[in-house]
Image (cartoon, rainbow, N blue to C red):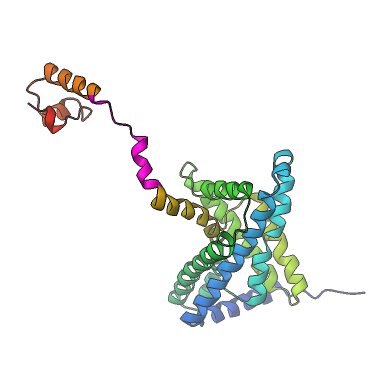
């Protein structure tokens, strides 16, 4: 009979501490490169997810739950690549580094250095992948794919949503990422690591929880809109604020002069609570 020898939680946590010590000892350059690659790998999984769900318009319309389930299944690809290549992901470090710090095996300074550099270079890697290997390669080439991607990106940065909603979605995501990290540390072979990673990450992607590093890749769609506005859209703003016809302006000016020939701008603003604003030409 085949038996599986699983390490105890204590053994796993000792391994977590040793990983935290190793992360704290990384040099600046090595940490930056590892974090950059980690951000790129996460974006790869996000891109596959977007390609699947954005291209399935009919399935999204008829059965959105199945579309989400299938697309979410592809998302853990990036997490698996990070695990097997031993690169850096800030959300995994949010689980590992505090444990090592509480064991007094690393300093708070080392923890903050890892978090700060890891997060910044994860963001750089995600934006690099989204810009150079997704947008410029025209991977999402159809109008439907692009429209869905932009809608998703705008939804994640919408100020209409309560901040607590996105915050709690991030908490749920990082909880499952921490569980996936814990499970992979308990395994030795890559096949078991795949199972250990896939189930928790698939769960958080399907539930709609928010992973901040993966969302940086989607922000490229919003940044693209900002770039095009800067290049081509600024001059169009004049058309959104039509000026009043000259005759209407003269009539309005005469009425103001007849109703209050000696009124000053300061007095009008004080009396009407700032609602009446007169031009210098209207002051007698």
**Which quadrant: the N terminus?**
bottom right
Query: What span is colored magenta in the figure?
Result: 233-246
Report whether residue 154 is seen: yes
131 is higher (above) or lower (below) than 114: above
Q: Nearer the viewer, residue 229 or 64?
A: 229
Measured as percent of width and height from the top left, residue 130 is found at 55, 62
Tell me: 179 left or right of 114.
Answer: right
Report whether residue 96 is seen: no
Q: Magenta stretch containing residue 232, yes or no?
A: no
Measured as percent of width and height from the top left, residue 5 is found at 80, 76
148 is higher (above) or lower (below) than 246: below
- Give the quarter of the image for residue 176: bottom right
Q: Residue at x 17, y 18 (%)?
A: 255
Measured as percent of width and height from the top left, residue 236 is found at 38, 42
Most common SS among magenta residues = helix
Measured as percent of width and height from the top left, residue 170 is found at 55, 55
**Which quadrant: the C terminus?**
top left
Q: Nearer the viewer, residue 176 or 263?
A: 263
Q: Magenta stretch containing residue 241, yes or no?
A: yes
Q: Nearer the viewer, residue 108 or 116?
A: 116
């Amino acid at each position: 009979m085949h038996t599986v020898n699983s390490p105890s939680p204590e053994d796993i946590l000792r391994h977590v501490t040793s990983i935290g010590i190793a992360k704290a000892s990384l040099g600046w350059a090595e940490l930056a490169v590892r974090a950059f690659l980690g951000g790129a790998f996460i974006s790869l999984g996000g891109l596959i997810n977007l390609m699947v769900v954005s291209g399935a318009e009919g399935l999204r319309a008829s059965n959105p739950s199945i579309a989400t389930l299938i697309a979410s299944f592809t998302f853990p690809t990036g997490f698996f690549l990070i695990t097997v290549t031993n690169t850096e992901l800030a959300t995994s470090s949010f689980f590992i580094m505090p444990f090592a710090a509480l064991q007094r095996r690393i300093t708070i300074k080392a923890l903050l250095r890892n978090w700060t550099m890891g997060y910044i270079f994860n963001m750089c890697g995600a934006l690099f992948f989204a810009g150079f290997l997704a947008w410029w390669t025209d991977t999402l080439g159809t109008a439907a794919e692009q429209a869905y991607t932009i809608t998703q990106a705008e939804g994640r940065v919408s100020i209409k949503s309560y901040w607590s909603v996105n915050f709690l979605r991030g908490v749920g995501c990082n909880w499952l990422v921490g569980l996936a990290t814990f499970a992979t540390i308990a395994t030795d072979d890559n096949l078991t690591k795949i199972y250990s990673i896939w189930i928790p990450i698939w769960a958080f992607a399907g539930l709609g929880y928010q992973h901040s590093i993966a969302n940086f890749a989607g922000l490229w769609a919003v940044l693209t809109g900002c770039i095009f506005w800067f290049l081509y859209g600024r001059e169009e703003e004049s058309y959104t604020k039509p000026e009043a016809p000259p005759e209407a302006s003269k009539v309005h000016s005469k009425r103001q002069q007849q109703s209050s020939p000696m009124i000053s701008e300061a007095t009008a603003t004080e009396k009407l609570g700032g609602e009446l604003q007169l031009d210098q030409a209207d002051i007698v």
